[in-house]
Image (cartoon, rainbow, N blue to C red):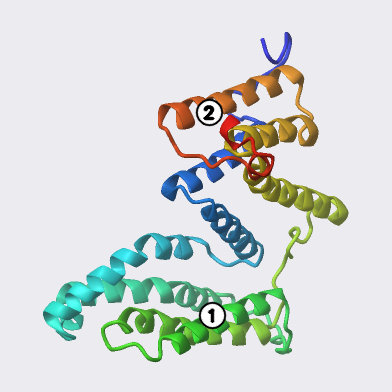
Amino acid sequence: VLLGEGTEIDEEQIRGSLLIPPVLLLVYLGAFAEKNAMEDLLLVLLFGVLGWLMEKLHWPRPPLILGLVLGPLAENRLFLATDNYGTAWLGRPGVLIIAALTLAGALYPLIKRRLRQRDQPAARPAARPAARTLSFDRSALFTLGIVAMAAWALWESRGFGPRAGLFPWAIGFPLLVFGIVQLYFDVARKNPRPGGLTGETGSEIPAREVTRRTAGAFGWILGYPLAIWLLGFAVGGVLCTFLSLKIASRERWPITLAITAGVWALVYGAFEQGLHVPFPPGQLFTWLGLAGAT
């Protein structure tokens, strides 16, 4: 009914233009509902930009996610193991097995690459290895930031006692060492990495169009928290969803109104009225003295 007669619907895929606006609002909604703090929306933006940079610069993101999820648990278990066993827990069989598996997983790509090079046909004359040239690109700058962050964290923890500094030192020193090694490879690599901050090399989309789309996406990502701060979730978030569907994606009125109504029912009906999530009034309404009306 919404799409009209004769419209073909792909049962396996839904257009991203229909999913992104409500999902983006749900991301900010979930970030606020965790601690009922508007500051968490800024953390969402910060880690979103960090994840985008890591993807564009070919840095793996799963280790960062695992560190954020398992970091508090690892710190707690490290304290318990040290308090109960001292340093003797490092020699326990289970710890040695886990350490061996971790080391094997880290070295596996390097070993696999060496074996592949060794198994290459010897009849073909070996190409002359490319000379290493020093270059400082975006990837090296990102790595330098990680090194600086690790060094700063270790400097700040210099006055910690053995117990308080145990976890920061156990994480900070390896991070600093591996960061310096990665920085060396980034600066002295033989061939530059493909891609950039706005698109991959060889993309069929023109670079100007990629830049325009990237700027538009960042504009909407920043616009959501700004509208939520000014107008509140029930007004600002829903309004951004409507504008994104109608202006950015140019969806038809029936689909736009249906999705907007569903999002409003979820935010206002389910979260605010049903679950009694204490959404703050929009700052604009507070300035106008109409906070009670929202």
Q: Nearer the viewer, residue 128 or 175?
A: 175
Q: Earlier in the sequence, mark 1 or mark 2?
A: 1
Q: Nearer the viewer, residue 252 or 14?
A: 252
Residue positioned 74% across, 33% down in the render? 243
Q: Secondary structure at mark 1?
A: helix
x then y, percent, for residue 114: 50, 79
Q: Amino acid at mark 1?
A: Met
Name the residue carrying label 2.
Answer: 268
Residue positioned 30% across, 83% down in the render? 166
Q: Is residue 70 left or right of residue 9?
A: left
Name the residue carrying label 1.
Answer: 149
Please state, as top left, top right, bottom left or bottom right, where the N terminus lies in the image: top right
Q: Residue furthest left?
A: 84
Mark 1 nearby-residue class (10 Å; few <14, some 14–19, many ≥20): some
Q: Amino acid at mark 2?
A: Tyr
Q: Is residue 218 left or right of residue 279?
A: right
x then y, percent, for residue 80: 18, 73
* Tag in front: 1 or 2: 2
**From the viewer's perspective, is residue 220 above or below residue 243?**
below
Q: Is residue 137 left or right of residue 184?
A: right
x then y, percent, for residue 141: 67, 79
**Tag shown at residue 229:** none
Give residue 145's quadrant in the image.
bottom right
Tell whether label 2 touches label 1 (CB within 8 Å): no
- Inspect this view and state whether residue 21 appears: no
- Distance Cα–Cα, label 1 vs label 2: 41 Å
x then y, percent, for residue 99: 29, 76
- Inspect this view and state whether residue 183 appears: yes
**From the viewer's perspective, is residue 35 above or below residue 239?**
below
**From the viewer's perspective, is residue 19 above or below residue 259?**
below
Please state, as top left, top right, bottom left or bottom right, where the C terminus lies in the image: top right
Q: Secondary structure at mark 2?
A: helix
